[in-house]
Image: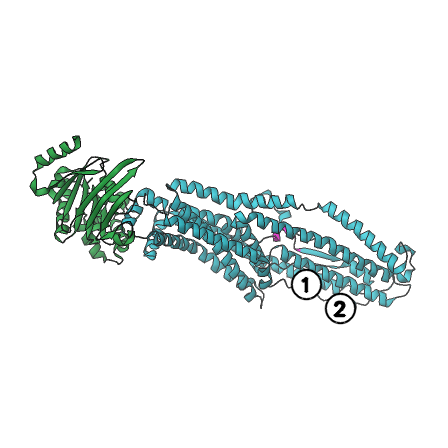
Chain colours: A cyan, B green
Amino acid sequence: MIAVIAMRDFRGFIRDGRLPWLGGLALLLLIVSIAVGWRLQSDTAAERAATEEKGYATWVGQGPKNPHSAAHLGMHVFKPEPPLALFDPGLEPFAGQTVWLEAHKQNDFGFRPAQDATGLRRFGDLSAAYVLQLLAPLILVLIGFDALAGEREQGTLRQLASLGVAPSRLLWGKALAIGAAAAALLAPAVVLSLIALYQAAAVGALADNLARLGWIAIGYGLYLGTFLFVTLAVSAAAPRARGALVALLAIWTVATIVVPRAASEAAHAALPTPTRIDFMNALGVDLRAAQNKALEDNFHVKNASQLPMEEAPRALRVDDHAGYVVFDKHYNGLWDLFERQRHLQEWLGLASPLVALRGLSTSMAGVDLAHQRSFATAAESHRRLIQDTMSDNRIAAGGSEAYNYQASPELWAKVPPFRYEGPSSAEALASSWPNLVTLAAGFALSLLAAVVAARHLRPF
Amino acid sequence: MIKTRRLSKFFDGNHALDQVDLDVEPGEIYCLLGANGAGKTTLINILLNFIPASDGKAWINGLDVAEHPLETKTHVAYIPEQVTLYPTLSGVENLDYFVTLGCGRRFSRDRLLELLEEAGLDRAAADRRVAQYSKGMRQKVGVAIAFAKQAKALLLDEPTSGLDPKSANEFSRLLKTAADRGVAILMATHDLFNAKQTGTRIGIARSGRIVAEIGAREIGHADLEALYLDAMSA
């Protein structure tokens, strides 16, 4: 009986033009967003690999040189774009994708695509995640708002009730029809994503990326399922289809625009991020203090210029190591602040499943704060490896001719190319399971609301 | 088959039904006459459990309609004054849908077309979308839905409203055939002529009460009209 109801409704969606028009538009957007993302990703991945390879070739091909100068040349490393970023770019366009590993200082990330974008970017990027987060719930609303209210209004609900169709079966039939309509839209996008993933994922990383895609699918399933059952609950309770539509559009606006925006603003207001100038000033003050103290503790002088020439390499190393602690304190403090902002935003965003979904989606796509932090930490470790390798060699060379000393090119090859492996899907899930729980709770509540509304369904 | 005892319904303190006792036996066509607001539709709505009774009880095939809302529906078929169908489906698709849900099994297309034909809808119209149907054509699909179910009881609320005289006459014939098969029929109507022609027993309702009841064979057209007018003016 449920299948019969679902088939009738599905046929109705096709014949009244809602599915072909709305669904066709959403499907087109999904396919375009995935295809464009796929193309961009494959182009930029090749460019990055080539640039990084060239950068390392420049490093090892420096010729005889003072190690200190080599450390200042440093190298540029690139954050590998996760394959699933083509589905959800997350922080990628804003957080920067490359960093210059230079002596003595931890540089900020560069190359943010958002910096090069036009003002239109303020309206959001066209990505599959954007389509599924904002447009797909709207399409569910537009397809399902009259599922029960419309039947009541036109009188067919009375006819169905007289035939002994249980309200619960009607509810499941409607849910199946709308769910099938959504699946018909999503299936080509999922297939395209799988092909793109297969092409983009590195050998050995496919299983991990498939696991990530699986969790993303579960998250979006719960999210869209929540909207589906909220739509049916409102449609069952509203006396008129028009009233149901108005109520559902209000819910969609609040859940997808107002609450996420308000939660983000409130989190930033409660836990303000320091300006770049303030951050750099505080870092500079602490660096100077720590380095002066290290000089005093290790060499009993207040200034490096008071040291004999042969102590300069060792003093530089002490100075750098004192800096590591300060960099860690300030940058970790900043990352922790971002994390606290994210947690607060998720608590404030409990009223909207979108906040939890974004957390889960960006985490499983490998484009969230935690993945960015992991890369930044790995890049900084590599910078310190370069710096320490150069310093150690210079100290070993010793003598008063430290500034004239030239290391042989074999030294450069002692620094391996930067290889970054991000967190696994299990690690990503471990940090975002509260979002999954929030989504599951939202789904369960919406299902309960729909069942209760259907139980009180009156034919007129 | 259809039975009520002291059945009452109040809306905002007003009696829509006031202690109605009714029995419709298998093979009987009970025509309930009455003006608008006499309580005819309210009685049918309670029998279908669309609305709860304020007091009293109603049974179909021995089952309390309030306690067994779904089971009683397996024994009853209903034709409203305005049969509502899905406009994007054809007549035969609507019939297929409702009959499958009502009977729990699928009928062949030939059988569905036969049912529509028996209800007076020609085959050419059966495949047209219902959005293009007149009220009478929709009513015929409603009749086909009700008869396909082969229920033990039929509840009809002004079913011939909108039907042309020929179709109304054909509908009366279908009701009599059903009654001959042992179906109990309760038909609410304004139409005295139709009630006299079709019914086996006629009740007259006023202000929620059945104020007169008579066998259809015991009274002529003119006398029925006089009795009705008397009851309305009392």
- Whether residue A168 is in magenta: the answer is no
Read off the chain for label 2: A
Which residue sits at x=20%, y=38%? B209
Residue situated furthest top in the rendering: B233
Question: Residues under labels 1 and 2: Cα distance?
Answer: 16 Å
Read off the chain for label 1: A
Q: Position of residue B215 (x, y in %)?
A: 10, 43
Asked whether residue A31 is in view, the answer is: no
Position of A407 with respect to B70 (left or right) is right
The foreground one among A320 and A159 is: A159
Position of A283 with respect to B210 (left or right) is right
The foreground one among B162 and A78 is: B162
Which mark sits nearer the N-terminus, 1 or 2? 1
The answer to whether A46 is drawn above or below residue A279 in the figure is below
Q: Quadrant of the C terminus of chain B?
A: top left
Which kind of residue does numbered mark 2 sit on?
A: Lys
Which kind of residue does numbered mark 1 sit on?
A: Glu
Position of A65 with respect to B173 (left or right) is right
Q: Which residue is mark 2?
A: A414
Considering the numbered disc 1 on the image, is that residue within a helix, a strand or a loop? helix
Q: What are the residue bounds of the magenta stretch?
A: A91-97
The foreground one among B32 and A331 is: B32
Considering the numbered disc 2 on the image, is that residue within a helix, a strand or a loop? loop
Q: Which residue is mark 1?
A: A53
Q: Are marks 1 and 2 on the same chain?
A: yes
Classify residue A327 by image quadrant.
bottom right
The answer to whether A186 is drawn above or below residue A270 in the figure is below
Few, some or many residues within 10 Å of mark 2 (<14, 14–19, 20+): few
The answer to whether A176 is drawn above or below residue A153 in the figure is below
Tell whether label 2 touches label 1 (CB within 8 Å). Answer: no
Q: Nearer the viewer, mark 1 or mark 2?
A: 2
